[in-house]
Amino acid sequence: MTVMEDAQVLWDYHQLHHEPRDTDIAIGLGSHDIGVAEHAAELWHEGRFPLIVFSGANAPTTVGVFPRGEAVHYTARARELGVPDDAILTETRATNTGENFTFTRELLDRLEVRPASATIISRPYQQRRAIATSRKVWPSLDVVGSARAQSLEEYISSVGDEERVLNMLVGDTQRIWVYAEAGFAERQHVSQSVLEAYRRLVDRGYKSRLV
């Protein structure tokens, strides 16, 4: 298997292919990927939800890209795309996926907004972990996952850094079982083919985002 063949196995594993549906809110998870904000804006314009909560402070991989914080930059991008101020909330403290949901829930509680359902919007290869985390941290919330529809090649082209994307893809895959074992997320089935592709990529040096 080539590097890209193994990467494709991991990429496919993280795609959930949930059917879009209307929900009470959307939660846009902070990352290096401004496409999260753009996809959230697209879905808002389609009428999928009336309110978007963008959540995220900074991580070492994002501080140079979004110096004011992930959620702040996401909010600015959504406004540029026509989402009005009263349809956006900005949560600026979260530094990991669990905190995205914990702090979003706290923010909504303070505003006496208590959603029953949410569209969880993430970068494409975070979908599985995002949903697994939401179900552990906020089990009463009925969630559907969504991400911009892109191939692995298109995503690498949009980011402009193949090595960075592959390292993050490997890291997100490892977090599926590491975070479940730590109690941060629901357990997910991991097939032998996914494990083998992951191990080959680690052996080839894609280790910078491992925990």
Image: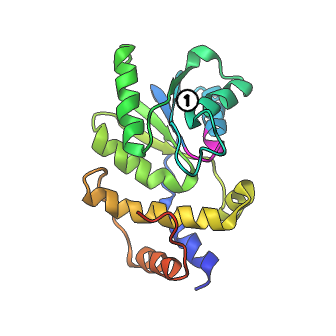
Residue at 50% across / 53% down in the picture?
126
Percent from the top left, x then y, of residue 62? 59, 46
Q: Looking at the image, what colour scheme do you see?
A: rainbow
Image vertical order of residue 115 relative to residue 34, above or below: above
Residue at 67% across / 27% down in the picture?
76
Residue at 49% across / 48% down in the picture?
18
Q: Do we see residue 116 in this rendering?
A: no
23 or 137, which is in the foreground?
A: 137
Numbered range of the magenta stretch: 31-36
154 or 49, which is in the foreground?
A: 154
Q: For the stretch drawn in magenta, what is the main secondary structure? A: loop
Q: Amino acid at mark 1?
A: Arg
Give the side of residue 35 with respect to residue 208, left or right.
right
Q: Residues within 10 Å of mark 1 (few under 14, many from 20)?
A: some
Give the side of residue 57 with respect to residue 41, left or right.
left
Q: Which residue is mark 1?
A: 48
Quadrant position of residue 101: top left
